[in-house]
Amino acid sequence: MTMIRVSAFRWVPPLAQGLVRELRVRWALEEAGLAYEERLIGPEDQTSEHYRRLQPFGQVPSYEEDGLVMFESGAIVMHIAERSEALMPSEPVARARSKTWMFAALNSVEPSIQNLAEIDLFHPQEEWAKQRRPMAVEDVKTRLTSLSDWLEGKDYLEERFTAADLLMTTVLRILRHTELVARMPVLEAYRLRCEARPAFRKALADHLAPFARNAPPGD
Ligand SMILES: N[C@@H](CCC(=O)N[C@@H](CS)C(=O)NCC(=O)O)C(=O)O
């Protein structure tokens, strides 16, 4: 029997809860119907030699499956999707389109969103961040507008839900501290549609559970 193990943080502050990238992998595994264990880690593991062999940058997630070790949430989700019709059609053209949108989520949409999130969540008081922010918001809006135009009249990026929608939804979630997605009805409806999937609800609950168990006193 295949044994799958995914790393996750034992605890993160509330601003990161619901956003840590192992949520993508949990969601993919739920959609695919694959059981897994979690490897809960803390700061001491991030720098350990052992964990660096699983994730060279000391980040989350890492993925172990029998003899295979992987990192990078996008690569892991694609690996799972390639074996699950629920996440990616086997028909070659539809499969290639899904992969195209997976890369678009991570390579064309996520960078500007991550940039804004870093300004807002990690450097809100710094002068450089205040100066940079208006341009960063414009960059996000440009991408969101293109995405919204593409999704107009559609339920998903392509004909049906695929791993690309899974990744795109987790990218849009990074903007939850702003009204940028909420103010765009097509994108907001798309996000809610994807988040309503039972596999997402289960993955999110399992992602949040360790944070409640391991919350520092007073948090
Ligand atoms: N490109 C990587 C990014 C992973 C990443 O940014 N992980 C964050 C959590 S969402 C992390 O572990 N941060 C802690 C750190 O960088 O030390 C992926 O998608 O897997």
Image (cartoon, grey):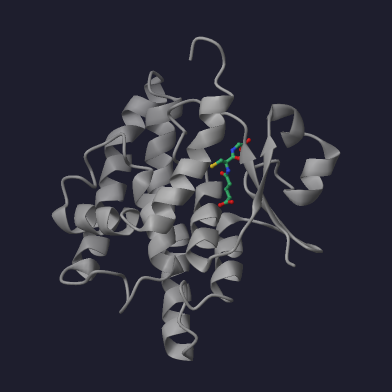
Q: Quadrant of residue 216?
A: top right
Instruction: Give percent across and percent down for residue 108.
Output: 41, 60
Given residues 97 and 140, the one toward you in this image is: 97
**Residue 79 visible, this angle:** yes
Ligand 1 picture quarter: top right
Residue 174 versus residue 47 in the image, above or below: below
Name the residue rendered at 54%, 53% in the picture. Answer: 26
Q: Taking 134 as reference, is 132 left or right?
A: right
Q: Taking 184 as reference, is 88 left or right?
A: right
Residue 138 versus residue 96 in the image, above or below: above
Instruction: Give percent across and percent down for residue 149.
Output: 19, 66
Residue 142 versus residue 129 in the image, above or below: below
Count of number-bearing discs: 0
Q: Quadrant of residue 33?
A: bottom right
Judged from this view, the residue extending furthest toward the right is: 49
Q: Quadrant of residue 161?
A: bottom left
**Residue 109 visible, this angle:** no
Name the residue rendered at 51%, 48% in the picture. Answer: 23
Given residues 131 and 57, the one toward you in this image is: 57
Instruction: Give percent across and percent down for residue 142.
Output: 26, 55
In which quadrant is the N terminus drawn? bottom right
Instruction: Give percent across and percent down for residue 15.
Output: 43, 29
Name the residue rendered at 69%, 28% in the picture. Answer: 43
Judged from this view, the residue extending furthest toward the top is: 218
